[in-house]
């Protein structure tokens, strides 16, 4: 998979990096082979990101310096961050309302999910919010979720998993897989969570 194509290569390296890291760490050689720098991530999954979110995402990942208002979120300017938090919660609520039947079938509590998402978003800074809002495809969302896990940002990773559960459209299986990752998140030493990550990986490759 490391040589299959660029998208599969990046997703494979992120997955292996996340799963191998807590099991004794990575050797210098292996760490080098599995690393994914922010520029490579953006180059690979940029087409799966909302174009209006890319400037802020590039700043959030440390690729470029701020030069416009759209990037103010990534710079953690209070007014922009508060506005984006409200937008994200409203968007999540709207997506949730469209999937109530499926979520109920899968045994998920929609009210609890909304409360959890609101709490997670309220605790995220501008750079994390810029990463949460950017993906418009599940593979890009998974890639950013894995990056958050690798960087030890469990709150952002859990928000990605929860958002993925309601954002995934047209696929009961993908909804279930993101729900499993959310419910087991985010201890990488936990076998249940590790299996949930592996299932999401294999779904996409």
Image: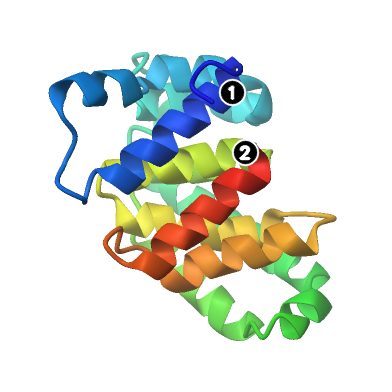
Q: Position of residue 175 (x, y in %)?
A: 69, 63
Lower position in the chain sequence, tag 2 or tag 1? 1
Q: Position of residue 107 (x, y in %)?
A: 67, 86
Q: Residue at x 54, y 26 (%)?
A: 1
Judging depth in this view, the residue of 191 and 82 nearest the camera is 191
Residue annotated with mark 2: 139
| Relative to 31, 198 lies left or right | right
Contact check, label 2 and label 1, Cβ < 8 Å: yes
| Relative to 188, 57 lies left or right | right
Whether residue 8 is visible to the viewer of this picture, yes or no, is yes
Q: What secondary structure is marked by label 1?
A: helix
Residue annotated with mark 1: 7
Q: What secondary structure is marked by label 2?
A: helix
| Above/below status of 30 relative to 195 | above
* Mark 1: few/some/many CA within 10 Å (<14, 14-19, 20+): some
Whether residue 80 is visible to the viewer of this picture, yes or no, is no
């Amino acid at each position: 998979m490391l040589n299959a194509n660029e998208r599969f290569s990046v997703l494979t390296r992120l997955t292996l990096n996340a799963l191998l890291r807590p099991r004794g760490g990575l050797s210098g050689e292996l760490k080098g082979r599995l690393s994914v720098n922010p520029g490579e991530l953006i180059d690979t999954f940029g087409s799966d990101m909302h174009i209006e979110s890319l400037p802020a995402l590039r700043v959030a990942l440390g690729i470029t310096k701020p030069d416009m208002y759209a990037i103010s979120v990534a710079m953690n300017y209070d007014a922009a961050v508060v506005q984006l938090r409200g937008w994200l919660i409203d968007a999540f609520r709207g997506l949730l309302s469209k999937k109530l039947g499926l979520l109920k079938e899968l045994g998920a509590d929609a009210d609890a999910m909304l409360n959890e998402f609101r709490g997670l978003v309220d605790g995220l800074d501008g750079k994390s919010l810029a990463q949460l809002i950017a993906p418009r495809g599940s593979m890009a969302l998974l890639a950013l979720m894995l990056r958050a896990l690798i960087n030890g940002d469990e709150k952002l990773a859990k928000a990605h998993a929860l958002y993925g559960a309601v954002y995934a459209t047209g696929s009961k299986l993908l909804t279930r897989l993101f729900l499993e990752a959310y419910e087991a998140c985010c201890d990488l030493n936990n076998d249940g969570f590790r299996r949930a990550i592996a299932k999401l990986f294999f779904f996409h490759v």
